[in-house]
Image (spheres, rainbow, N blue to C red):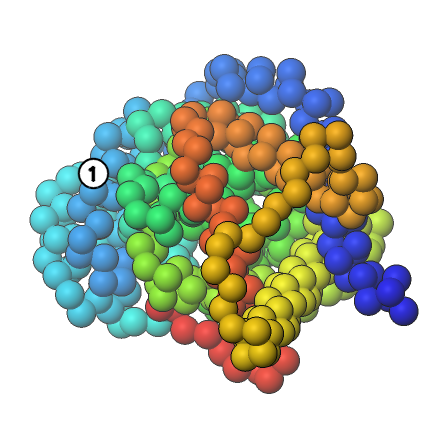
């Protein structure tokens, strides 16, 4: 029974180690190729490109978003910017109106219908070779589009994702996300080389326009159209790449409530879209995506929830025992006594594997910071390792609950 009781924890450790070791081995095998990609130059003419910016109540960020696009180092005669006002009720329409004077910016206004409808309106007006999207709270670096365009010299490449970074992280929640996003920069690059990317993020993912002609436009997709379109592309064997030196800075949630709502939508959207594409799971024809990336995700979610609830149960059990002891003996003054033995090392297998997993995780995060050209800050690590495991189960649990009982999430 002890073995069965500890099985989920051992399974979680195994999955974590397997995932981390797999990533590191792939990185070691491909590191020279990854390094060479940083200085790639296009061998042909740069393709024409349209960037669609869907806007809904983005009065505080839309001006800087459009300005970052205007400052792109890209031929102006090959760059079109389409901003779509999706029924905003704030000052967004007035701000957009001030950008009508620019020749390569086109503004459209429509009733609110959701982000996917705004993107589809832009797609319907687009005839360029490439088309991309940029969330209205994100800011693209000057050379990002040129660096991404290089990847389309390969005729098999159908979409390219950028490296997304947290814009000006200040408080604890933003710093936690900073660690998470930089970790994601490393994972996306490795997944790109494994051909198993399953999300094309809203901040500046670029596609061949022909993708949408071949497989259709965006769908509602449980408010996560960026996951669904990537899975649809993968199901059609379309190659998605990642340019880890094309930087886009995005505004992230500043409070727990806004972070919770965002991650609930993301996690719920992933689960629902994964169910919609369940035919890809454990299928050899879908390669690393079907055999590795997709199956691991739900197992990881369930294992993480089990560990968190087990930890909470143990803490509660200890607290109740302590209260019962205090009632009998009273509160004991003084500090807890620790027996420090320099000649003793805990050789428990589970403890050792946890340590190895943690070391690999720190290594991956540091590499992710290098990919994102960010400095490693010790306190950001401290905040993340203390808080992330406490707050993340909240949206994981509610996501599963909403999935089981067919309840929907809201955008904000």
Residue shown at 53% from the left, 39% from the top: 183
Looking at the image, can residue 224 be seen?
A: no
Q: Quadrant of residue 45?
A: top left
Does residue 363 appear to the left or right of 294 in the view shown?
left
Report x, y in % for residue 124: 39, 56
Q: How many marks?
A: 1
Tell which of 29 and 382 is nearer to you.
382
- Residue 72: x, y in percent? 29, 29
Residue located beneath label 1 in the image: 67
Rendered-image quadrant of the N terminus: bottom right
Seen from the viewer's position, the closer of residues 15 and 113 is 15
Residue 405, image x and y in percent? 60, 84
- Which quadrant, please, contains the C terminus? bottom left
Task: Kindly tell me whether residue 120 is visible in this rendering.
Answer: yes
In the rendered structure, the answer to whether residue 62 lies left or right of residue 101 reads right
16, 79: nearer the viewer: 16
Q: Please state if 20 lies on the left or on the right of 370 as rendered.
A: right
Q: Residue at x 51, y 64 (%)?
A: 332
Q: Quadrant of residue 46?
A: top left
Q: Residue at x 59, y 56 (%)?
A: 215
Q: What element does badge 1 sit on? A: helix
């Amino acid at each position: 029974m002890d073995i069965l009781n500890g099985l989920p924890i051992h399974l979680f450790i195994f999955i974590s180690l397997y995932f981390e070791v797999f990533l590191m081995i792939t990185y070691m095998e491909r590191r020279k190729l990854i390094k060479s990609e940083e200085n790639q130059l296009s061998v042909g003419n740069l393709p024409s490109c349209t960037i669609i910016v869907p806007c809904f109540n983005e009065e505080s960020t839309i001006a800087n978003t459009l300005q970052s696009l205007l400052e792109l180092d890209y031929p102006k005669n090959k760059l079109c910017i389409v901003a779509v006002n999706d029924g905003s009720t704030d000052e967004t329409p007035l701000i957009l109106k001030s950008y009508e004077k620019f020749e390569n910016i086109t503004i459209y206004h429509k009733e609110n219908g959701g982000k996917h409808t705004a993107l589809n309106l832009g797609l319907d007006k687009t005839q360029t070779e490439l088309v991309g999207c940029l969330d209205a709270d994100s800011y693209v670096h000057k050379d990002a589009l040129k660096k991404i365009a290089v990847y389309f010299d390969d005729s098999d490449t159908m979409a390219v994702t950028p490296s997304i970074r947290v814009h000006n992280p200040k408080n604890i929640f933003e710093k936690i996300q900073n660690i998470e996003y930089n970790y994601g920069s490393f994972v996306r690059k490795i997944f790109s080389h494994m051909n198993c990317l399953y999300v094309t993020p809203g901040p500046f993912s670029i596609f061949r326009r022909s993708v949408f002609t071949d497989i259709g436009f965006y769908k509602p997709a449980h408010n996560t159209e960026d996951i669904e379109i990537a899975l649809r592309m993968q199901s059609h064997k379309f190659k998605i790449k990642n340019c880890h030196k094309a930087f886009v800075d995005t505004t992230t949630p500043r409070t727990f409530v806004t972070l919770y709502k965002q991650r609930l939508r993301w996690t719920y959207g992933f689960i629902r879209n994964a169910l919609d594409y369940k035919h890809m799971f454990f299928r050899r024809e879908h390669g690393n995506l079907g055999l590795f990336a997709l199956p691991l995700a739900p197992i990881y979610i369930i294992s993480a929830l089990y560990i968190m609830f087990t930890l909470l149960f143990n803490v509660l059990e200890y607290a109740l025992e302590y209260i019962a002891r205090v009632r009998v003996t009273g509160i004991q003054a003084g500090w807890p006594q620790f027996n420090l033995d320099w000649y003793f090392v805990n050789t428990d297998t589970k403890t050792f594997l946890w340590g190895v997993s943690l070391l690999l995780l720190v290594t991956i995060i540091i590499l992710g910071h290098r990919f994102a050209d960010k400095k490693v800050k010790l306190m950001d690590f401290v905040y993340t390792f203390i808080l992330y495991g406490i707050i993340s189960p909240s949206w994981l649990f509610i996501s599963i609950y909403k999935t089981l009982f067919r309840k929907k999430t809201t955008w904000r």
